[in-house]
Image (cartoon, grey):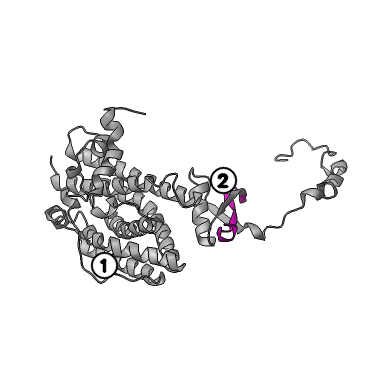
């Protein structure tokens, strides 16, 4: 059956107030047009968004779960990269 | 009743929406794929929502204190005035989508015209429903094109659905004294104009889908007078069961 199955698509939705599209899930569809329609029907039924992106899942390249250690752990010990060593002067807003 | 013709006109529209909504709802849990299952029930809910607005208006025009539920659930078969097309069984997915396409292609120009009606409540319902209907037509058209221009099997099934449903399409443009009275007061559009827009859409989509229009001129009518096909009784039995078994029940 797997060779007759429609391709998988990843769905990204931007909400009314949102500035960026956020990944909300995936679905199957035969092509991009129907992927957008399916995304509309499956993921925006409760007014979740005003813009949809769909990307075929096979076009997404992801990090390898076995490489988590070398990819991400080295930054855990670099606390000096976090901007927490500054005194924020009084009167500075929106920091 | 002050405006019996308008009441009848609105009731006919409401029944078209309700019965097609009920038919689509039958797909719930049975869709060919999860995404399409949700798409069809979404469209079903849009249609039932339109039916509620139209029944509310009809009940107000009737002036007898009835609710939309009374009109939806407590009439007899011959009191429903929907076209035969919408009560036809779902068949396979091609049959369902072609039935939907023929109906959407009719409803879109009808709502566009009704947006300009001097009957403000009807115009407001048309304006709200038009947005939904544009999407329904887009969705059903996409499927007709993909099935027609798809595999040999999907093409055959789509063409078989057209050949079967064609006899029910003429009734969408059925007119009698109800329509003529309202048209004379320029409250509703002349269906000949709607039919021209419908035919344009049908031809464009079917041609892209490599499907052909039947050449026969069989016409099945009767729904607007309450004379239905044998399928209607079964549909109503399911639709009305709860209200008939437990009168005035709420949930």
Q: Among all residues in the image, which is located at the extreme front?
A: A1
Residue B196: image tag:
1
- Picture residue at 30% right of the left edge, 70% below the top: B213
**Residue A69 on image: x %, y %:** 84, 46
Number of marks drawn:
2
Which image quadrant is residue B99 in?
bottom left
**Image quarter hosting the N terminus of chain B:** top left
Where, by quadrant of the figure, is residue B148 drawn? bottom left
Which quadrant of the view contains residue A73? top right
Q: Are marks 2 and 1 on the same chain?
A: no
Q: Pick whichever, B173 or B236, lies toward us.
A: B236
Label 2, residues with CA under 10 Å away: few <14, some 14-19, many ≥20: few
How far from the left and from the top, in percent, is residue B24? 37, 48
Q: Position of residue B87 (x, y in %)?
A: 28, 50
Q: Position of residue B149 (x, y in %)?
A: 44, 69
- What label sits on residue A17 in the rendered view? 2
Disc 2 to disc 1: CB gap under 8 Å: no
Task: Report helix, strand or loop for mark 1.
Answer: helix
- Determine whether A91 is above or below B161 in the image: above
The secondary structure type at the circle numbered 2 is loop
């Amino acid at each position: 059956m797997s060779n007759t199955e429609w391709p998988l698509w990843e769905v990204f939705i931007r909400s009314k107030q949102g500035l960026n599209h956020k990944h909300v899930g995936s679905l199957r569809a035969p092509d991009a047009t129907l992927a957008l329609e399916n995304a509309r029907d499956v993921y925006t039924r409760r007014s979740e968004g005003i813009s949809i992106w769909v990307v075929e899942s096979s076009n997404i390249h992801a990090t390898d779960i076995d490489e988590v250690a070398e990819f991400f752990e080295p930054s855990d010990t670099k606390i000096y990269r976090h901007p927490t060593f500054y005194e924020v002067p009084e009167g500075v807003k929106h920091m | 009743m002050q405006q019996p013709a308008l009441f009848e006109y609105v009731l006919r529209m409401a029944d078209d929406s309700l019965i097609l909504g009920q038919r689509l709802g039958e797909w719930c849990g049975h869709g060919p794929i999860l995404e399409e299952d949700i798409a069809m029930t979404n469209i079903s809910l849009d249609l039932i929502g339109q039916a509620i607005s139209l029944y509310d208006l009809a009940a107000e025009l009737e002036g007898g204190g009835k609710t939309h539920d009374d009109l939806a659930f407590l009439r007899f078969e011959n009191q429903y005035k929907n076209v035969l097309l919408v009560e036809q069984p779902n068949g396979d997915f091609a049959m369902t989508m072609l039935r939907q396409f023929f109906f959407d292609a009719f409803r879109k120009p009808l709502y566009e015209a009704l947006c300009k009606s001097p009957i403000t409540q009807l115009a407001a319902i048309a304006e709200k429903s038009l947005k939904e209907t544009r999407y329904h037509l887009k969705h059903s058209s996409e499927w007709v094109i993909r099935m027609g221009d798809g595999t040999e099997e999907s093409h055959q099934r789509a063409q078989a659905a057209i050949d079967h449903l064609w006899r029910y399409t003429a009734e969408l443009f059925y007119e009698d004294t109800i329509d003529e009275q309202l048209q004379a007061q320029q409250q509703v559009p002349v269906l000949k104009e709607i039919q021209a827009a419908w035919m344009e859409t049908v031809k464009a989509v079917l041609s892209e889908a490599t499907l052909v229009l039947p050449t026969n001129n069989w016409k099945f009518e009767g729904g607007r007078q309450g004379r239905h096909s044998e399928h209607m009784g079964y549909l109503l039995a399911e639709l009305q069961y709860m209200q008939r078994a437990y009168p005035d029940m709420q949930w």
